[in-house]
Structures are given as structure tokens and as C-alpha cells.
Amino acid sequence: MTDLSVSSVEKWLGGNHILRGASFEANKGTIVALLGASGSGKTTLLRCIAGLEQPEGGRIEIGGNVVLNAEQGIALPPEKRNIGLVFQSYALWPHRNVFDNVAYGLKLRGVVGEEARVRVMAILEKLGLGHLSERFPDQLSGGQQQRVAICRALVYEPRVLLMDEPLSNLDAKLREDARYWIRKLILELGICAIMVTHDQAEALAMADHVLLLESGVIIQSGSPIEIYSQPATFYAADFLGANNVLRGKLTGAGAIGGEGWSLEGVVRETRPLALGDEARAVVRTERISIVDGPGENHVQMQLDACLYLGSAWEYRLTRGGLAMKAHGVQQLAPGEVWCAVPRDAVWIFGL
Amino acid sequence: MATGGIARRSEGQVYRVAVIAALVLVVMTPVGLILYQSFLDAPFFDKTARLSLEAYDYVLTDPDFWTALGSTALFAVGLVAVAVPLGAMLAFLLARTDLVGKRWLEPVALVPMFLSSIVLAFGYTVAIGPSGFVSLWMKETFGFKPWSIYSLGGMILIGGLSHVPNVYLYVSSAMRSLPSDLEEAARAAGANIWRVSLDVTLPMVLPSLIFAAALNLLLGFETFGIPLVLGDPSGIVVLTTYIYKVNGIFGTPTYHVMAVVAVCLILITLPLVYFQRLLLRNSRRYAAVGGKGARATPLRLGPSGQVIAWGLIALWLVVSVALPIGGITVRAFVDSWGEGVRLRDHLTLAHFAHLLDTPSLYRGIVNTLVLSVVGGALAVAIYLAIGLAGHRNKGASGAVLDYMVLLPRALPGIIIGLAFFWVFLFVPFLTPFRPTLVSLFVAYTVVGLSYGLRIIQATLMQVAPELEESSRTTGASRGRTWRDTVIPIIRPGLVGAWSLIMIVFLREYATGVYLMGVGTEVVGTLMVSLLTSGSMDQIAALAFLSILFTALGLGFALRLGARIHD
């Protein structure tokens, strides 16, 4: 069931076109990640859904109710949209303790007294905060504050949960745990969640559906696996993962080459490319391996240096104008090596 | 559902527009009335009054008016010339150096700002006036007295010294946000501390210096107490005292002449206020460069520097704090003084006993306390209502509000009081309120508007936008968000604002000059009217009480941690 439907949302801010017709739908029990670099409009899109920004065009429905219809001049205020929003800074009210922070949404909906207490304590217990209900926000750690913010947004069972960079204020270890338990919680509760993030690992790990934004346009959407392994554009290919970008010319129907090198690949460019056109290829570092000798799509390269990264070694490879990075488990001596680059790992785009 | 939403959204809008419309009415009515009156040939309530430029013709051809205008300009410029360098130096010493004792020095240095200029001027009269304590002592000891405060020079010096804190406040807050590495670089390059202050610190805070100069120029044009007490005996008249005196010259109410002078004064002050607004925008832009990461390490003065700095500050403190306050304190407790009189033998509480005996003076004390404590709290509530209407309001109504708040700054208290006197005299349903404190309260609220709103707005800005947004997304309307989230968070700031407004209302004297009547006496204005009858004993006792109340209010404000800085 579609809980959130966004269509052709347009937003201008001081002469800048921030959102250029963003459209997507999200269903109950799924997490949608809005992924993009800073300035891509992802947070603006989230704030438009929440009603904190007024888009100039488009239509938004939450749980079947029209909350925005720019043409008819309908724009419900945030409090009428039946949403929960988790802020990047958590925005816990400093004058209320944990219990009152969480209970406020229930109070506004007329739920008070024993029923409110039971519901607030239930969600606090669920997130392991039961013993902190009397504390004030400034007496909590960052991780605890974040969990309170999630409790506060969920306790009144909104149709849509919106999260603005929910993990960015946590330190690295907590963040990895949070990815897991937030996803588990949302699936358990079966609600529709929208999350804004600039961290691709977060988006890939937590979401069922990833929307990749560039300059206010959703340039690709799909499951995390599709987004990562089937990029539709050079921007998408380059934005995700750790990449080598090789510049050269199209030397065959599916081949790219430069001075002294040539690789078979797949053309992913949507525009037609002619033989001899300037082209570039994206190769994820994890797809390159060092092999014993020549073979299909093997290139001989000079290993310049070998950097220790802790979990792996990084190889710095060159051949004429070509430079690549690859990862491996062992230290290698500098010198001539052979690299294997599978044909389906070389994604060729125009320039 | 959808239409309900629209209604909700406009609910906040309705509130904003209603509050701002009420504000426009309260601010524009007196201004409009003055402007209208200035173009009539008789009081506006007179049936025979016709539109005419007669009053302008009279004022603009009156040599006394031009003399007053000249004196006003000289006084204001002189005041700036005295106050700005001293204030900037004080700011540098207190904000940028390791001066010993600067923590307790700051509140002391601000004292002249919190005293009304009528109290200060009276204090100087009894201390260093022709028969003041210090003057007499000088004559006894050395046989001569080398000064005269009843002159334009004396007025300028006293006005300048008492406005040093106003300069200090703006310049020091700019200096505090300056990163120290700029000064440290100059020291490392070989400049001594005084060179650093002249070559590095001052140029960096130039915008705030210009702002302080503009502000004090404005205050100079609007001053009433100092020219009244110090200028009047030797016939020096400025625009505010010209308005005050003009009735006496004609013997009949000359509302149209007073209105014309008021209009002339506003024509000078309004551009100054507008200029300040422009400056403030630019200096904000400057301040952003400083950033919050700026580390402020105080410059080391060294032993000789400490001595020089303390010498200068002590001299200033003696002249601008100890002299007037000491003078009033002594004068309030003695019944006779003069050459060869030992003050110790003439100590008395009679002046205070007399205050309690005289109903009008006693009422004045009670009314002043009621107006400042209760009225101050009400005024803060009103400023809060206005502040919320402008809070995160980027629409046209927000801009209108900005200008409405700015306008009263161009109006000296005496003119605001005069205009409201007319309003309460002749608007039918308001007439019953004229002989009550309500009329004074309304005028005081307008007088304190820009100061009060600046405090409230600064407090409101401290609430992070997300705290309000999270309340909205949780399901609270705009009004509910204000009530449940914004106001509880800023409550300490509101109490601080209350204490500061209390002081503003305590020291006010000019606003009541026309509004005050039997039953609505206030301490400040009583002093003005007692001046005419020369009842120095009562003035001294009232001035002493005024200082005492202000000190209590200031102590209360500091205890609450009120931010005197913007």
C-alpha cells in the first residue's frame, strides 16, 4: 500500500531551482533513502514532504490524503500531515525530560494519563531507554538522544517517518549498530520511512529503495543492489563505491583504450557513441585483481607502491597515462604485474 | 481536510497581521497627530483651526529656534566627540586586556547609562555647581573654582562622560568577537600595547565605532534632562527644552508651534535612525568574519600599563559616577551647607520624612514602583506578543514591523509623551484613561519599544529553528508551539528582559512631562516639575530614591544574568 506519493515537486529558493520535478512513491514497511551530495536537494525534498518548506509546484499525498497540491493552493501545515520527523540535530526540547519529550505528541492527540504513560514507556523500553525517562536531554549521550528522537517521532504511530541524516551525529561504532537496529525497528513496526543521507554505505545498508539525487533531480532509483551494480549514468557510477576513472577513446563496439592499453567493457552511456570518441570508464577498485599472467582483459601494469590500510593493501598501478588503484590481501614488491579487469566491470560512458 | 489546513495556516497569519496592525495604530497615531497639528494654525481640537503654514513660518523665523538648533547640534556633536574616544578606550581595556578587576568594573562602568540624565545633571549641580559641595571645598581650600558647568562646554563634558557606557557597550561586544591572533601578530612584529590598540584593534571595530557615534548623536539630539538642569540657568536652550519652554513664552497652549519643533527634531533623528539600521546590517556582515572559533586571549598590560589604565579609569569613575551620586547622597541627608558649615552637624532625614508627608510625592514613589514593576512585566508581555508576530516572519508584515519598532527611536520621550497626551485628551473613549496610570503606561511602552523588542528578538533567536519545527511535525500548531515550546525555553530571557525594562521605566522622566497629572505622579517627572519651584530638598531625596531603585533593579538584573549586551 502506498503511504507516500510525491509527484513533480518543484522548489525555488532565492532564484535557485532546488527541486526540479521530483517524483516517487513509498510503501508501508519499506525504507526509502534519498541519497545525494550536499546541495543535491535531498533535505529540501524531505522538508517539503514534512511541510516545513512550501514547494512552488507538485503534489504530495500521505496515507491517501492530499497534503500538497500547488495548483489548487492546498498546503497542509506540518502538524496536519501525520508524520514523524527525526532531525539531524535530534532537536529534543531542552525544557522537557525524556518522558515528556516523547509524550508531547500523544498529548497533542488527546492521549493523556495512564494510556499515554503505557505507550511512552513501551516505546522507551523497546529502545532500551526505560531507565532514562526522568533525564533531561542535556544529561544524555548522543546515541541516547538519537533514540529518544526516534521514540518521539514514532510514539503516535505516524503514517510516514522522515529522518534527516539520522546517523550523522553518531560516532563510527554507534553508527554501524544504528543502521541495523533502526532498519529492524522500522520493519517490525511496518511503517513507511524516508531517510536523507549523503553516506552511501548508510543508504545501501538501511534502505529497500534508494533514490539518487543530483541538482534537484532524481537521476536513478532502485534497490540498493541495482543502484550499486547497474548505474545508469556516469554520475551514478562515480558517486557510489570506490572507483577508478579511466580516460581514453572508444576503440571498439565495447572497448576503451589509450596509449598502450585497451580494455573490453560494456557501454552504459545512453547517448550513441561513435568509434574514436573521447570516452571514460568507471571501474570499482574491488573488481580489479592482480593475477599471475596474461589472459582475457588482463593488462600489464607497473606497481609503483603498496600502501597498508589495515584490513587490506592498496596497490598503486600505472601504465603510461593510465593510473589505477586496486586492493589485495598481501604486500607485493614494486615492479611489473598483471591486472585482471572483468569485462562487465568496465562501464564505458561518453565524456 | 484540505480547507481546514488552509484555515490553520492563515491562523498564524491572522495573528501576525492583527498584532502588527495594532502596533502601527499605536505608533502612527501620535506621529500622525503631531504632523497634522504642525500644519494647523490653532490647536487641533479648536473648531476654528485651519490648515496653514503659519506655525512653520513662526518657528523658522524665530531667532531663538535657530539658536536652539545650533546649540543642539553643538551639544550632540560635542557629546559624541567626548564619549566615543573614551568609550572606545574603556572597551579596549575591559575587553582586550588583562586589566586587574575588570570583572566587577564592567557593571560599575555601566552605571551612568542606567541613571536618568535629570538625576545625573542634578547630581552635578549639587556637587560641582556654583554652590556645590566640591565647588565650595575648592573655594575654601584654594580660594577659586576653575570651572563652570552652567555652560555649553560643561553640558557637553557632562553629557559626553555620561554617554561613555553607550559607546562602550557596542564597541566592546565587537571587540570581544575579534580573534586575538591579529593583535598577537602585531605584538610579535614589535608594536607595544597602545600601538596595537590604535593600529589593529580600532580599525577592526570601526563599523561599531561609527554605529556608536551615530547612536550617541541621536541621543544627544534627544537629551532633555542635562540641558534643562545645566543649560537653563544660563539661558542655553536646545530643541527639547525649546518645546518645553514655548508654552511659557506665549502663555497659551501653542500646540502648533510645539508640533513644528517636534517635526523638525524628527526630521533630524529619523535619518540618523535609518543610518544606524544600515550600519548595523553591515556590521553584522563584518562580525560574521570573526566566526565563533575566534579565541580571545587578553593582551598583557604589564605593571606600568596597569597603573596608567587604572589611573584613567579611576579618574573617569570619580567624575562620572562618584561626583553625581556622591553629591546627591550628601545633599539628600543634610539641611544646610555652605562655607564654614560642617556637614556632619547637619545630617537629617527630614527630606525623606517630607516625601512621605506630601501626598503627591508619596504617590509619585508608589506610582513609579507600580509602573516599573507591574507595567514593566506587562510591557514585556506586549513586546513578546509583537516579537512572536515578527518571529521567523519573512513576509511584508515582518518588514512593516521592523519600521514600526524603529520609528519610536526617532522620537524623544518628551514628544511621545506630548503626542499621547493629545491622544488621551481628545480621543473620546480614551479620555477616561488620561488621569490614570494607563496613559503613562501606554507612552512608556512605546518609549521602551525598540529597546525591549531588541532584547526579546535576541532571546527568540536563541531558540534553534529545529526545536520549533520538531514541535510542528509532532503535531502542534504554530500557536501551540509558541505556548508549549518557545516561551518555556526563553523564560529566563523574559525575566531578564523584565528587569531591564523595569530600569528603563524607573529612570524615565521626560515622557511624563505633559502626561503627568494629579494622581499619576512619577519620580522622574516630579523632579522636572520641582525644578521650576526650586525645591532642591525634595529633588535630592527623590533623586536618591531613584538611584536606590535603579541599583536594586540593576542588582536584580545582574543576578538573573540579564544580558545587557545585544
Image (cartoon, grey):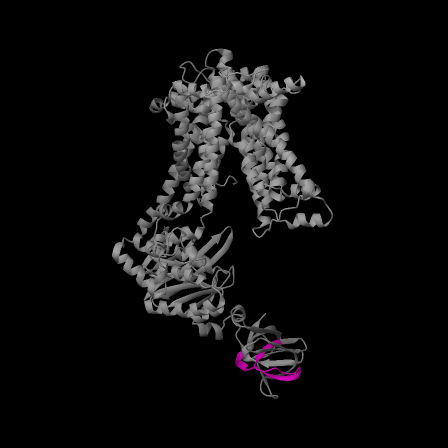
Residue B357 percent across, percent down from the top left: 39, 18
| Residue at the extreme left of the image, as rendered | A114
Do we see residue B256 in this rendering? no
Q: Nearer the viewer, residue A318 or A128?
A: A128
- The vertical placement of B448 against A213, above or below, is above
Residue B373 occupies which quadrant of the picture? top left
> Which residue is at a point 59% across and 81% down the rendered structure image?
A263
Closer to the camera in the image, A248 or B425: B425
Magenta stretch holds residue A344: yes
Could you tell me residue B86's position as x and y percent? 63, 34
Q: In this view, does B183 lie above or below B25?
A: below
Q: In this view, does B104 lie to the left or right of B398?
A: right
* Relative height, residue B479 to residue B526 (above, below): below
State whether residue B279 appears in this view: yes
* Residue B147 lies in quadrant: top right
Q: Residue furthest top?
A: B251
For the residue pair B319 and B500, the one nearer the viewer reads as: B319
Q: Is residue A36 magenta?
A: no
Q: Give the range drawn in magenta.
A: A324-345
Q: Which residue lies furthest to the right in this view?
A: B190
Percent of width and height locating residue B520: 39, 22
Measured along the vertical axis of the image, is residue A169 above or below residue B465? below
Q: What residue is drawn where x is 41% and y is 70%?
A: A180
Q: In this view, does B259 lie to the left or right of B435?
A: right
Q: Which residue lies furthest to the front in this view?
A: B345
